[in-house]
Image: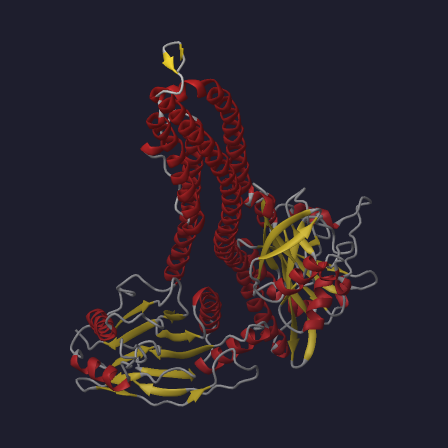
Amino acid sequence: MKTLFGLTLGGIKHKILNLVLIFLLAILLVFGAVAVFQGKKLSTVVNDTREKQQRSIRQVSEEAMHQTLEGALKKTTALQTYVADEVFTEASNDIDMLRTMAQGIFEGRSSLEKIEASLPDPKTQGTLTAQVLCEEGVDYKKSEYLGYAAYMSSVMINMVGSSGKIENCFFGLRDGTHICIDSDPESKFGSDGKLMSFPVRERPWYKLAVRTGGICFTDLESDTYTDKKVVTCAAPVYANGELIGVIGGDISVDKIDEYVKSSLENGGFVCILSKSGRVIFAPDNNGIFTVETTETAKDLRQSENKELADFVNTAVREPTDLVTISAGGKEYYAIGKPMSSVGWTVVSIVDKKATEAGTERMLEDYDKINDEATEKFNDASSHSIQTVLVLTLLILAFGSAAALVISGKIVKPIENMTNEIAEGGRTGKLFEMKEIYKTKDEIEVLAEAFDDLSKKTKQYIIDITQITKEKERIGTELELARKIQRDMLPNVYPAFPNRKDFDIYATMEPAKEVAGDFYDFFLIDEDHLGIVMADVSGKGIPAALFMMMSKILIHNFAMMGASPASVLEQANRTICQNNDEGMFVTVWLGILEISTGKLVASNAGHEYPIIRRGDGDYEYHKDKHGFVVGGMSGIRYSDYEIRLNKGDSLFLYTDGAPEAVNKDNRMFGAERLISALNERKDMDPVELLTDMNAVIREFAGEAEQFDDITMLELRILPPE
């Protein structure tokens, strides 16, 4: 045997060295193969997980954003429609009242003498006055109608002076004469100082009112004298079947225009369309809609953009869901809701790209993090290969134990990371930094990158939660609408503290945020008390809007001294003129002559009233029912009388009381209602209704309240 550097060639040490060298080389070869395999597997898993997470993030973000945006825009659009509708509904009621008064004057003109009406006088500039205008070639002094129409002057002046909605009003007569109420007589004269003619019968509001035969609204028009943008509410006046003329008023839309123009923010805005599909109000430079005059404005229902045309065609007829439309090279979310009064439609628009900005930024950050992590991983891998080649000789000297430990430290964290990433792809679990990944090499760099990405994903979830809070804000606004509705009903008690001859009290428990039931009581004069109990079909905001309109109509007509049947007929006629949604209301209306106890009442499809005589029991008074108000035009109603003596009581209610159900789906019922009243017949009205509400709630238990519950108690007090 030969010896070389102290090592015996062919000896045991040599063989052991050879065995160790072969073993270590095999280990290095195996480790290299495993490292290559795990590296490729890790790269594949990372890329696959990256694509899955991107798809998942985009899908969840879009779904959450769509649901949140749809709910928020629906409620916001509904609230905006309700606020705008209130302006035109009040104006419509004022014009309808003027029309009724004018009709009465002309039907009784045989007993009236004509009175004079004056031409515009510049000396009255700045003062509301009645001014006579006429068409070219028409002599106002020979007018058959002007002398009677002048009786309306003081009423029209008072209305313009007290109304916060109508800027001026007028009465255009069929013979070409015209009475105008405003404070600007100077505008009626030309530059030559001569009074200008006024083409009464050619004005759009005159033609539209005559054509429709009822209360109507024009599109956005320019005032004849001031060029101010207004909407005109007008109605034809007939007397004994003869057209007398058209009475109307101009409604200023400056505040609506200002609100719409200020709504452009962060890619979203509000616009208003006419019922003919034309843009009436829209912010400047909104990217989609352009406001033009009536003569040049385009009907968007005929737009070449089919998505836009279909959306507008639906929105002018009924509320829409959230839809996507493309215009001007962009995509937008859009939702619309018509106004029941004027027939316009409120449309809310949001730039779709603006809603996706957060998602896109997050995905960009995600890609950036991945690219940086991949680059760091590749750089570190290249450096590691060089280091491994240099250290291979040293590794051979350390032995198999060191090789096994090192290989274990490299392979195990990678396998654990791969399994955790794969699990996250299946379950959505976020990746977390653990002690096993703190290897002080490329594996730790990659793990930190994934950990950073997971934290950003968690932050995104927090952002989505913040969006959900915005939905709660919308709920707060609905609560405000509920308070406004409650404030419209009598709610201060005692209602008539100076009256010792009767006591009255009423309550309403709405089933939703806003109610469709309503009650009302008011003194028509010192000896007549009007009492109303009504129930609107449907629930929620539509029923609440219909309830407010019905209450105002019935109250106004009753205050004019008509009988209950006549009041219901007038209200039915007015509602049926603009009731495209087919809503209706059941009404019990009574007018009590306080001094005699005579109660004249009429029932339009409502529940039977309940009466208690003196110290007796409560009993149903099965009166004759008429048809519901708003169900069909031309309906006639009948009056009937009840005599209420001292000590008698009248109990009114809506069907929400007897039809309240418990968890077993059993109704409270008419018999249980009578029984509960008789058990509490000695209570005063406040105690009685408070206790009755408690009894119904106790019966219903945990069952959800299905309908509004409204009750009213009137008690005729004996002399003190």
Task: Give the position of the C terminus as an image quadrant.
Answer: bottom left
Q: Quadrant of residue 242?
A: bottom right
Relative horizontal placement of residue 326, taking residue 700 as reference (left or right): right
- Residue located farthest toward the front when viewing the structure as drawn: 1
Relative horizontal placement of residue 331, taking residue 584 as reference (left or right): right
Query: As rendered, which of 610 and 171 lies closer to the eye?
Result: 610
Q: In the image, is residue 427 above or below residue 242?
A: above
Query: As rendered, which of 417 and 251 lies closer to the eye?
Result: 417
Query: As rendered, which of 558 and 673 lies closer to the eye?
Result: 673
Number of residue marks: 0
Q: Is residue 170 among what the camera can see?
A: no
Relative horizontal placement of residue 161, taking residue 419 as reference (left or right): right
Residue appearing at x 56%, y 76% in the figure: 576
Task: Give the position of the N terminus as an image quadrant.
Answer: top left
Q: What colour scheme has been applied to the protein in the rendered image?
A: secondary structure
Q: Is residue 133 among what the camera can see?
A: yes
Q: Position of residue 662 (x, y in %)?
A: 27, 76
Q: Position of residue 463 (x, y in %)?
A: 43, 42
Q: Position of residue 160 (x, y in %)?
A: 57, 56
Query: As rendered, which of 139 and 42 lies closer to the eye?
Result: 42
Q: In the image, is residue 481 above or below residue 576?
A: above
Q: In the image, is residue 316 above or below residue 668?
A: above
- Residue located farthest toward the top when viewing the structure as drawn: 5
Residue appearing at x 50%, y 50% in the figure: 65
Q: Position of residue 602 (x, y in %)?
A: 42, 83
